[in-house]
Image (cartoon, coloured by chain):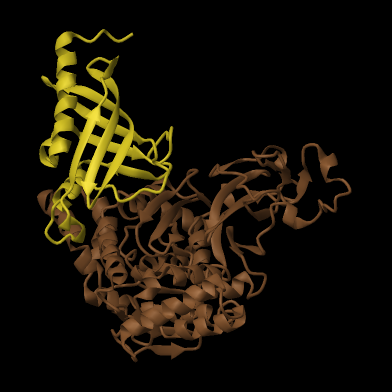
Chain colours: A brown, B yellow
Amino acid sequence: MPCSAIHADLLMSLTSHMTGTEESPTAMSSLAMDDLHRLVEPARVHRDVYSSPAVFALEMERIWGRAWLYVGHQSQVPKPGDFITTTLGLKPVVMVRHSDEERIHVLHNRCGHRGAIVCYQRHGHARGGLFRCPYHGWIFRSDGSLRTQPSPGGYANVGFDASDPAFGMPRVARVSMYRGFVFASLSPDGPDLEDFLGEARDTIDNMVDRSPLGEIEVTGKVGHRFRHRNNWKFFIENLHDAMHPMVAHAATGDAVKQVLDKYPDSDAGRAEAEVIAPFGGSYDFFDEMGFVGLPRGHGYMGGSKSIFSHYQMYPDYLAAMEEAYGRERTEEILSYNKHNTLVYPSCTVRDGIQSIRVVKPVSVNETVIESWTFRLKGAPQSMLDRTLRYSRLINSPASCVGPDDMSCYDRIQEAAEAGTIEWIDLHRHLGRDVQAGERVTAIGTSDLALRNQYTAWVDYMTTKSGARNAG
Amino acid sequence: MPAELDPQSEAGIRELIQRETTCLNNGDLDTWMALFTDDGYYWMPLEADQQSPDEHDSLIYDNRALMEIRQNNLGHPLSPSMDFPVRSVRILSDLDIATTAANECVVRTSVIAMINHKRQDVYGGSVTYRVCRVGDDWRIQCKRVDLLNADAPLDTIMMYI
């Protein structure tokens, strides 16, 4: 079948699936699932995965509606009543520390009355642990239950059940915390958080263990919010695309080198070069780092070697760590070197530099990447300085490397929308992966990193329960 | 109480800020950098009322080395984003100049800036300069730009504002 016919069939079936018009929803779902299968082949993906609004809508339902998604860190809500607002997929939620039991709840940010968003503030403190809808004054407790409505007589003996959670700010189906990192799932079914994270837990452990006190906290009240005018998958695919840095970031690498050459005998540019220069690493450098694919689309580069390997060690930090953990354990913690552990689909964790980037899909061709930096409690200021420097140079909307990544994503997005390419290639090192238990590995420049994400994508998108991934 | 600013100094400071704006409008980062002291820096905080660039993220916090890195990068033929030229214009409101110490002033103003790079983005905010006298000239020790929407989702910021 010609490619354009695939596209037309798919859109037709997906569109009718979404609108639920002609056949029963079950029949439509299975038809759509067949078509979704056809979008992903072992060595290529169809452009619709980036450009079809219908596919995007299904992703929100089947991937983002099932997987555990990163919500926030416990340090953002230190006291009862403290809250942040964010989104899970497209759904607005509030993460709040409950007034009585100090539990952290994640609530749908909508009033049980007319559905209005209760709170637009990005962070704050709910006085008395109460949220009040500004439209008709319904008041909710920080566990999501409805407390009161004005003039309650109107609801007496009319069949209104105030204890029905639907009239509150309903709790998101599942919420769980791993070492201070709060995740939530919009689905009541699926593996528990620890099983879901699998080996990705080690990266979170390592970030926390890098604090001499074993505690980390988010800096500031708001993180960077970097708008990408392209599909959410480009960002996470680029994390482990080791064929791009030496090309797409060659200019930045050269810009840094010029400064180092100009001031050979000074410190000028040294701290910045430490962050930026590894992005211009050689093909061999990235091949040696290697890629490890994990179940459910997770994965990381590195292990014993990463772009953080050559960071200088600050003696006062090393001393604080050795005092806290002893020499052997300190060495173990600090020699752990992973780059961009992806917790598919919602976040990527960099333990070595203490930052997390969070994927916020907005529409099929718009995404916001939020980034948060962490302070290692008990570590000297030099460590936070480096974390913040990294974040400015790499994660900020005014980043030195971001515009070039963005330009490349935009080019593919625009080609996918225009239909100037039907299939996006994933051939590199196909068939050379090494499967060992749940892990699948390859040299760093393999397209395995992308293929592993699409294995999960197909599982989520084409099985009714997302069986292998979420169920 | 610092002494009142003499007319000659005030004229020097006004000229400095005017030149700074013109350099950015022309994309002339080489001349622009020379208007800063050697330890001068450019700071664009992420949060309103942010006290320090050392405790939390900033959108930009550039020392001289980073200014040079950005200058080298701007228009670099190997940069994918440089297929589109970066053009920009900014307009400042009248300057409020206050003497804070001998040979040191704080200058406050507001800015509206448009940066054209593939799209056209509009930025607005307040600008605070700390300037000092170096020999016969005035130079910038710190330029702080507080965007109205620093904490909102932002597209790539391709040029200093």
Q: Nearer the viewer, residue B114 or A223?
A: B114
Quarter in which the C terminus of chain A is drawn: bottom right
Left or right: A80 in relation to A66? right
Q: Nearer the viewer, residue A240 or B122?
A: B122
Q: Is B62 on the left-hand or right-hand side of A72?
A: left
Q: Is residue B160 visible?
A: no
Say how many tags the image has: 0
Q: Give A202 or A107, whichever is nearer the viewer.
A: A107
Percent of width and height locating residue A183: 58, 62
Instruction: Tell me, yes or no, if residue A138 can be seen here.
Output: yes
A309, above or below A393, in the image:
below
Q: Position of residue B13 (x, y in %)?
A: 18, 20
Image quadrant in which the N terminus of chain A is located: bottom left
Which one is nearer the viewer's eye here, A104 or A318?
A104
**Residue furthest out toward the front:** A22
Q: Residue furthest right?
A: A157
| Quadrant of residue B109 within the rendered picture | top left
Residue drawn at x 68%, y 44% as measured from the top left: A80
Quadrant location of residue B129? top left
The residue sitting at 69% across, 39% down in the picture is A136
Residue A217 point in image, percent of width and height: 52, 50
x and y percentages locating residue A257 in the rendered image: 15, 57
- The relative height of residue A29 versus residue A135 in the rendered view (above or below) is below
Residue at x 58%, y 71% (from the top left corner)? A66
Quadrant of residue A287 in the image?
bottom left
Q: Where A102 falls versus A132 (above or below)?
A: below
